[in-house]
Image (cartoon, rainbow, N blue to C red):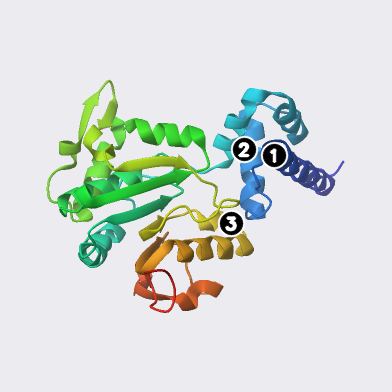
Amino acid sequence: MNKLADTALEDIEIELFVRALKLRHGYDFTQYAPASLRRRVLQLAHAQQADTVSALTTRLLHEAGFLPVVLEGLSVPVSEMFRDPDVFKTLREQVFPVLASYPQINIWQAGCAHGQEVYSLAILLEEAGLYERTQIYATDFNESALKHAQEGIYPAKEAQLWSRNYLAAGGSHTLADYYSARYELLKLDQRLRRNVTFANHNLVTDEVFCEAHLVLCRNVLIYFSDPLQDRTLALFRDSLVRGGFLCLGTRESLDFAPSAADFTPVDAARRIYRLGSRSGKE
């Protein structure tokens, strides 16, 4: 077969694989951006030394332990502490002073991956004197990623970059105050997890998770189709209290979403928005 025919056959195999994942295990990837999903399925096949995507489908249907491998391969748990530090600095300077007016603060970190941004948030809240009255709900559909996030253990080689990010984000101490290093690993201090609840939540199929004053979902929507982006943004809108804040990834935007009219920019360049007075809950 020629290359075009090979690609067409591959597309059929991927469609069947995604359908099997939904029917057999209830995980719906049908509304993910096609190019990104195709790339990740093929990368998974290569990593598993599968000759065809159909071979993955067979394992998915018949091997009970294969699902976590698939979910790990299809999710994108890539992040770093204080990623895009100017975003965290803006949160600290413009959002935290408003959150300080609430007696209890709920924050939803959707798509928390391996937890680096959750701990980044906890550190800045601690330094702002807000963490004692804050509950962070960190969610992801990937159980393996959630387990990693709960452990809070990362390669020590990341420490220099993360320390630079922390200072650029307006950190007032040194990042080393918040972790211990051993055997080329660093373990974040247990106290940073004291007000974090890790939970499984699927943005594709699940509904509102909590009532929140701040929702962060960074670099997740870029992997969704337009209809799924719209659904997810509506979910965030319905989760926020009136005047609550939404923080997206720097490559994401509300500009063309139906829910855009419900939000006003706090810092459009850093993708931080506030829910308008005519929407949301008290």
Assign a secondary structure to mark 2.
helix
Which image quarter is the N terminus in?
Answer: top right
Residue 177 visible in rendering: yes
Residue drawn at x 33%, y 48% is 136
- The mark that comes first in sequence, 2 or 1, is 1
Residue 235 drawn at (x, y percent): 51, 61
Assign a secondary structure to mark 1.
helix
Q: Is residue 258 above or below residue 200?
A: below
Q: Nearer the viewer, residue 90 or 244?
A: 244
Separation of disc 2 and disc 1 at Cα?
17 Å
- The mark that comes first in sequence, 2 or 3, is 2
Residue drawn at x 41%, y 32% is 148
Relative to 86, 149 lies left or right: right
Between marks 1 and 3 in the image, the one whose residue lies nearer the viewer:
1
- Checking the image for residue 21, the label placed there is 1
Separation of disc 1 and disc 3 at Cα?
17 Å
Name the residue tied to disc 3. Answer: 224
Q: Badge 3: few (under 14), some or many (20 or more) residues near its Cα, within 10 Å? A: many
Quarter assignment of residue 114: top left
Between marks 2 and 1 in the image, the one whose residue lies nearer the viewer:
1
Residue 185 drawn at (x, y percent): 29, 26
Residue 266 drawn at (x, y percent): 33, 73
Q: Badge 2: few (under 14), some or many (20 or more) residues near its Cα, within 10 Å? A: some
Mark 1 and mark 3 residues within 8 Å of each other at the beta carbon: no
